[in-house]
Image: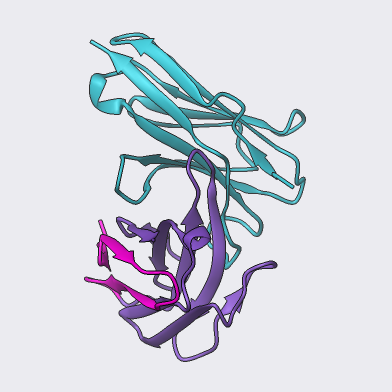
Chain colours: A purple, B cyan
Amino acid sequence: GAVVSQHPSRVICKSGTSVKIECRSLDFQATTMFWYRQFPKKSLMLMATSNEGSKATYEQGVEKDKFLINHASLTLSTLTVTSAHPEDSSFYICSAREGLYEQYFGPGTRLTVT
Amino acid sequence: DQQVKQNSPSLSVQEGRISILNCDYTNSMFDYFLWYKKYPAEGPTFLISISSIKDKNEDGRFTVFLNKSAKHLSLHIVPSQPGDSAVYFCAAKVGGGTSYGKLTFGQGTILTVHP
């Protein structure tokens, strides 16, 4: 099946700093990428949808200035958590889709803000 | 507003027996449903799906049943194996399988299969 990677898998940062998470589709061109956040024992919450070359569409309640999403190429999307705070600590998962085909998920990134 | 609900946070089953995972939804516009399996520190992997025009879809040990009138679907795994131990998420979307509709996930059910 298609492979989606995320980097880093785990990151610890200090409050007030910014963190960038990368999502790559390794063997297909991802026309659409999705960013999810998962709280402990909760469902995956969609944060935003990004199409290559255009601005991301954010879900209600997600601050676009805090969670910057860039999808500059067909194989790479980045999520930058700006001025991170402890409440931003979470598991962030991306998924990628080529056209109308199935979504493939990355392994996730565990962010801890101290 | 949780549109997709998995009311059982966990399920424990003996190896060889049937595992039944349940999912309920409230949005009648959902017309395509999926089940994903997730191991710790990994992303979800697709298991099986069903369109609202069907009431059953089978793939090997996995069968998904859909009851539209009750807005309920279930995933049956038989026989269950220890390697099936994982978190199972159901998800739903609007617009059919090949659509740009976003996925709405349930909270997940932790399945443990004992040898």
Residue A96 in the magenta stretch? The answer is: no
Q: Is residue B46 left or right of residue A48?
A: left
Between A108 and A87, the one nearer to me in the picture: A87
Total tally of numbered discs in the picture: 0
Between residue B98 and residue B47, name the one nearer to us.
Answer: B47
Q: Is residue A91 visible?
A: yes
Query: Is residue B66 in view from this perspective?
Result: no
- Residue sitting at x 47%, y 22%: B10
Is B19 placed left or right of B34 in the picture? left
Q: Nearer the viewer, residue A59 or B29?
A: A59
Picture coordinates of residue A72 (x, y %)? 38, 89
Is residue B101 depicted above or below B3 in this figure? below
State whether residue B63 is above or below residue B41: above
Quadrant of the rendering where the C terminus of chain A is positioned: bottom left
Residue at 74 percent across and 47 percent down: it is B1
The stretch in magenta equals A1-28
Pick the quarter of the image with the N terminus of chain A.
bottom left
Note whether B84 is above or below A28 in the view shown. above
Residue at x 32% of width, y 77% of height = A29
Q: Is residue A113 above or below residue B81?
A: below
Identify the residue shown where x is 36% and y is 69%.
A14
Residue B39 locus on image (x, y percent):
31, 39
Q: In the rendered structure, does residue A5 fall within the stretch colored magenta?
A: yes
Q: Locate residue B71: give its quadrant.
A: top right
Rendering coords of residue A86 (x, y %): 47, 60
A57 left or right of A77 in image: right
Percent coordinates x, y for residue B90 in the rendering: 53, 40
Residue B58: name its quadrant.
Answer: top left
